[in-house]
Image: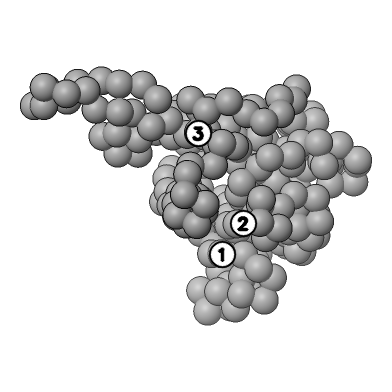
Amino acid sequence: MAATYDGNSPYPTEIREYLYKLLIVGELGCGKTSIIKRYVHNIFSLNYKSTIGVDFALKVIQWSPDTVVRLQLWDIAGQERFGNMTRVYYKEAVAAFVVYDVTRPKTFEAVVKWKADLDSKVRLPGGQPIPVVLLANKIDLKEETATSLDAEEMEKFCQEHGFLRWFGTSAKENSNIEDAARFLLEEIMNREAELSHETGHDPERIQLNQPRAKEGCC
C-alpha cells in the first residue's frame, strides 16, 4: 500500500489501489471498441477495425482521495462466443458489459446468449454470477433505431435475464458511458466491501499491494 501526504496532516495517508478486470462482449459491429475508446481516451472514430480475438485497455480512476482503481477492460470479439477461448478470456473477471446495436435487432436477440455464456464460464469467489450491465448502443442513430428502448420493457427484460440494469449509450455523442461504468464499478466496490467485511480483510485477488495466490499469463 503506497503512502502519500495530503498536505494537512503530519502523517502520511495510505493509498489503496485496486485492479478489476471487466469484460465487454456482444455481437460483431455493436460498437464495443468505440465505447472503450471513448471511455478510456475520450476519442471516437468511424474507422475502427473489427477486433480479432481480444483486445485490452486500462482506465485509471481516482475513486476517492485514498483509493485508486485500475480497470482492465477486455474487448472480446463478437465471433468469440462460438469458440472455446472465452473461458480463458473470462478468467478472473469481476463484471461485464453486454453490448448490442439498437439499429440491428439480431444483436439484441444475441444478448441472452452472451449472458448465458458469461454465467456458465465465470463466477465470483462465492460462486455467484458476475454482475452484468446491458448497453443499448448507437442511440444517436434515432432514425435508424429498430429495437424498442421502452424503459419499462427493458427493465422487465433485465430482471428476467439477470442483468443489473440497462443504459442507452452512444460512443459518438459520449452518452451515458461514464454513467454506466460508474454504476457497474460501484456495484463491484460494494460487493468487495461486503466480502471484506465478512472475511475481515481485503480480497487478495484485487488489492495490488498484496501477493497473489497464483500467477497466470493474464
Q: 52 and 87: which one is in front?
A: 87
- Residue contact between numbered discs 2 and 1, judged by CB atoms under 8 Å: yes
Q: Please state the horizontal and vertical placement of residue 36, each as a whole percent of the image.
A: 55, 35
Which residue type does callout 3 highlight? Gln
Among the two numbered marks 2 and 1 on one chain, the one whose residue lies closer to the N terminus = 2
Which residue type does callout 1 highlight? Leu
Q: Secondary structure at mark 2?
A: strand
Residue marked by disc 3: 207
Q: Is residue 83 left or right of residue 164?
A: right
| Residue that sits furthest to the left in the current view | 8
Between circles 3 and 1, the one closer to the viewer is 3
Q: Secondary structure at mark 1?
A: loop
Report, in whole angstroms, how far the alpha carbon at label 2 lies from the one at label 3: 22 Å
Q: Residue sitting at 60 percent across and 41 percent down?
A: 22
Answer yes or no: is residue 103 visible: no
Q: Residue sitting at 66 percent across and 50 percent down?
A: 125
Q: Secondary structure at mark 3?
A: loop
Residue marked by disc 2: 132
Image quadrant in which the N terminus is located: top left
Q: Is residue 62 left or right of residue 29?
A: left
Report, in whole angstroms, how far the alpha carbon at label 2 lies from the one at label 1: 6 Å
Residue marked by disc 1: 164
Q: Is residue 209 left or right of residue 214?
A: left
Q: Residue sitting at 54 percent across and 42 percent down?
A: 203
